Amino acid sequence: MGAVLAAVLGASLMGCSSTGGKRAEDRAAQAAAEGRAAVNTPRWTFAMVTHSGDGDTFWDIVQKGAKMAAGKDNINFLYSHNDEAQQQAQLIQAAIDKKVDGLIVTLAKPDAMKDVVAKATKAGIPVITVNSGSAESKRFGALTHIGQDESIAGEAVGEELNKRGRKKALCILHEQGNVGHEQRCAGAKKAFDGEMQSLYVEGTNMPDVQASIEAKLQADKDIDAVVTLGAPFADAAVKAKQTAGSKAEIDTFDLNAKVATELQAKTLGFAVDQQPYLQGYEAVDLLWLYRYNRNVLGGGRPVLTGPQVITSKDAAQLAEYTKRGTR
């Protein structure tokens, strides 16, 4: 009888664990849609200011995660962005002037962010950094950093290229001055047994991105792998490969619905996912926990959300999540 009871309890617990997360997410989504919160805490205001340019699907996913957590946590969520460092700093200052209750920032160009982040912490506004700037986050006074270690992510790319027998790779940097991008390519070069070159392109001009990659592939037929540092640029690399008549494999950082589809079709070799939804969600949630209970995660070290290497085999399992814009 004890064995039967244990089996019943085990089945019950398995049922709860397999559906509980989805039920909680559905409840939070319904509450947000109805203007309700899942908690009875003060209506705090959190601002997120990123270095995103316009139309970047990666940051759409980050925002979805942040907004989901904000709805659950009774947070008034404000989002702004600018890919120019000085303008991003001005947006952070504007959030400070509004006396927000919490601040989430990216440190793609940390030198330009240092002073304004210091102003936020001096004003008593808790700061969490996300996505870029893990090395500077603690030094700048942030509670913690949420994202992936870009050097480790780059090394994962180099190791995957080795497994695939690649000999000569091209790493595409689409935003000059972005320390995280430099770290990705440097990490890949460190772990890659073959030769890796860097190519700088103007990321705000996609036709120029495609033309630059195409010209490089036409000039060097030995290139057998192209690594882009963001999902939107993978498609430009695929088109460049076709027009150049190259046989190079196209691989990318980050995941979205199009990348998942192209992975399944084997148009792309692999993608490195850093789970942007999780970065947005956890940043808001951890700020709420700090305001509510003075909780801090990570012990002074970054809270890692990646890297995870996604192949055609994995993409099918993630397709439904990429279609709804959460992976």
Image: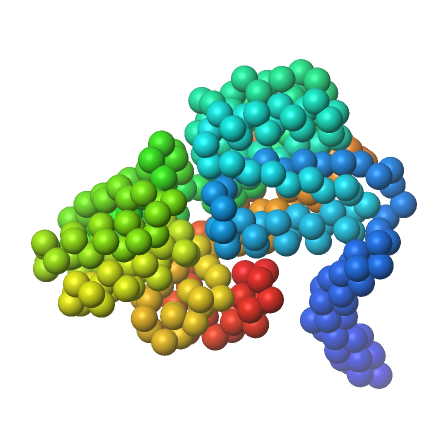
**Residue 293 spot, x, y in % from top left:** 80, 35
Q: Nearer the viewer, residue 135 or 101?
A: 101
Q: Is residue 108 left or right of residue 140?
A: left
The quadrant of the rendering that contains the C terminus is bottom right
**Residue visible at 50% across and 54% down?**
57
Q: Is residue 137 above or below residue 61?
A: above
Q: Is residue 279 above or below residue 256?
A: above
Q: Is residue 133 above or below residue 221?
A: above
Q: Is residue 102 above or below residue 119?
A: below
**Residue visible at 77% across and 41% down?**
76
Decide if residue 6 is in sight here: no
**Residue visible at 40% across and 52% down?**
230
The quadrant of the rendering that contains the N terminus is bottom right
Location of residue 249 by image quarter: bottom left
**Residue visible at 50% across and 42% down?**
52
Q: Is residue 15 left or right of residue 63?
A: right
**Residue 163 spot, x, y in % from top left:** 26, 62
Location of residue 236 by image quarter: bottom left
Q: Nearer the viewer, residue 292 or 53?
A: 53
